[in-house]
Image: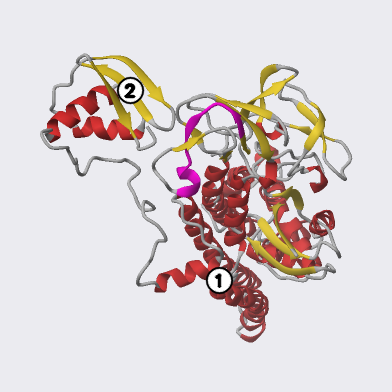
Amino acid sequence: MKTSTFDLRGSFGTLDHLGVEKQLLRVPGVTRVSANAASDSVTVSFDEARTSEAAIEEKIADCGFHCGGRLVPRHVCVIGSTTLSSVLPAATHPADHRSDGVAAKSVAPDRKPVTAEHDAMAHEMGHGDGKDMAAMARDMRNRFIVSLVFGLPIFALSPMGLDHPLLKPMFGLSLDLTLFLLASAAILYPVWPFVVAAIRALRNGVLNMAVLVLLSVGTGYLFSVASTFLFKGQQFYEASAVLLIFILLGHWLEMRARAGASQAIRALMDLAPPMATVERDGKDVEVPTAEVLAGDVVLIRPGNKIPVDGEILEGKSEVDESMLTGESMPVSKAPGDTVIGATINRSGSFRYRATKVGADTALAQIVKLVQEAQNSKAPAQLLADRASQWLVLAAILIGLATFAIWYWMLGGTLLFALTMTITVFVIACPDALGLATPMAIMVGTGLGAMNGILFKNASALEDATKLDVIVFDKTGTLTMGRPNVVEVVTAEGITRDEVLRIAGAIERNSDHPLAIAVLEGASGITLPETRDFANIEGKGASAQVEGATVLLGNRRL
């Protein structure tokens, strides 16, 4: 059984994702599906013997969405231009390398060679022709502006608006024709995403906000067009246009919030450096991290971030692994030791052989864990999903009943009855019900990951509110990340200030975290001059202090 998270582009609301879940569960071999409206992704558990990731992508595309492949850091993983078969989580040599950062051909076992185009500075989730949430928010903003620009004149010219004597139809056209042209511009382009989403939802067997919008805005516009050209009757151009303006404003703000909620995942992805220095044909060249293959020899200098996981071949250093372990102290590394991608080299230089790249790195696995937790559903969310679909159907039935009561039973005007019906269609949609919990889970798990706390699933996050006591497994897990001197134990005849004076003089030449702590402890003490300072990797340092050779370090020194 395998679990993968897929990028889902082009979604248009919570219930859109329920349609994807419904269709994917029909794929043979798929056992569990959890789609997330807030992150625009779907997590699928499936039997590899019965189906494949490519088949799941194809099914997502059949549902009317753009699938950008498995969600992995773009600048960490080699991603192809079309299908998931281009993702090489453990690509190995032979390879036709290119150092210009534009393209790389790589060969992995049981795979055909593929070409992956790269943007060396790309720091984003997914790829391809589908829009990400930020792009969708910009698109919705543009549609809102178009609708507002053409909608306000309609409102001004209509009985609902100012109806001022100085306001006249443009270019000598009749009022009906002027309203038709303005309404067409204010409605047809801005409403199109709702039309696509409504058709997709109906095809996938769900009712969502887009269906209600299409019923309300579409009914008003089409009836008005008919009354303009086919028969004389009431027109609802202004009602449809003004309603759409408010709907677009609401969806624009919603998509901005959804885009912001995914910042935590992007921050995790950005922990890995976009570029790496590797040996190619006997020379050290800089290439995108996505082009580093298993078996490559990577050069790391002081202060560099380690691009991928591997094993040190030569050199010694100290590496800050707090990103993974939470330990504030650097860890000494020597030939044969393992290094983890996205950790920071503090002091010496070394070369290491890449062993895990792409989706196999520790960082990619952490990102995958967070994505799966974000896409899992708390008990409250399962209830909300079931209720949402029934509430949309109820909204449609109540809207139709509203029209029947006001127009036929109470004798209201067609304009008033239709306006009330359109209003019910829109305000009764339970989109917020289905979006609130995923947004909360996404923000909670994302903030937890940024602070070193990983939640396995949404249920664990929900249950965390009931905790009274938290037990941590080892010392040093909860720190401020800044060591400080709390006690000085001296030999007989040596004072505390004397120890700090000599130690501070030596540590003044070092940038080790412990050196900073010692210097802070020796603040206010006059430090002597030193000569011949030498840093001893993994052990400490030595220097000449007042004519004597002084060694300062751990017990291995």
Q: Residue at x 54, y 75 (%)?
A: 380
Element marked by disc 2: strand
Comparing 180 with 142, the one in front is 142
Give percent across and percent down for residue 543.
Answer: 30, 19
Give percent across and percent down for residue 34.
Answer: 67, 65
Residue span colored magenta: 312-325
In the rendered image, the vertical position of residue 547 relative to residue 490, given as above or below: above
Comparing 226 with 125, the one in front is 125
Residues packed near mark 1 inside 10 Å, few (<14), some (14 to 19) or many (20 plus)? many
The amino acid pointed to by label 2 is: Ser
The Cα atoms of the two marked residues, 2 and 1, are separated by 57 Å
**Residue 19 falls inside the magenta stretch:** no
In the rendered image, the vertical position of residue 104 relative to residue 165, given as above or below: above
Residue 201, by quadrant, is bottom right
Q: Quadrant of the N terminus?
A: bottom right
Determine which residue is flagged by label 2. Answer: 542
In the rendered image, the vertical position of residue 368 relative to residue 122, given as above or below: below
Give percent across and percent down for residue 495.
Answer: 11, 34
Q: Quadrant of the C terminus?
A: top left
Between disc 2 and disc 1, whose residue precedes? 1
Residue 250 horizontal side relative to residue 536, left or right: right
Residues packed near mark 2 inside 10 Å, few (<14), some (14 to 19) or many (20 plus)? many
The amino acid pointed to by label 1 is: Ala
Element marked by disc 1: loop
Residue 245 horizontal side relative to residue 112, left or right: left
Q: Residue at x 73, y 70 (%)?
A: 206
User: Can see residue 140?
Assistant: no
Determine which residue is flagged by label 1. Answer: 378
Residue 268, by quadrant, is top right
Residue 491 horizontal side relative to residue 235, left or right: left
Q: Residue furthest front?
A: 492
Give percent across and percent down for residue 162.
Answer: 51, 52
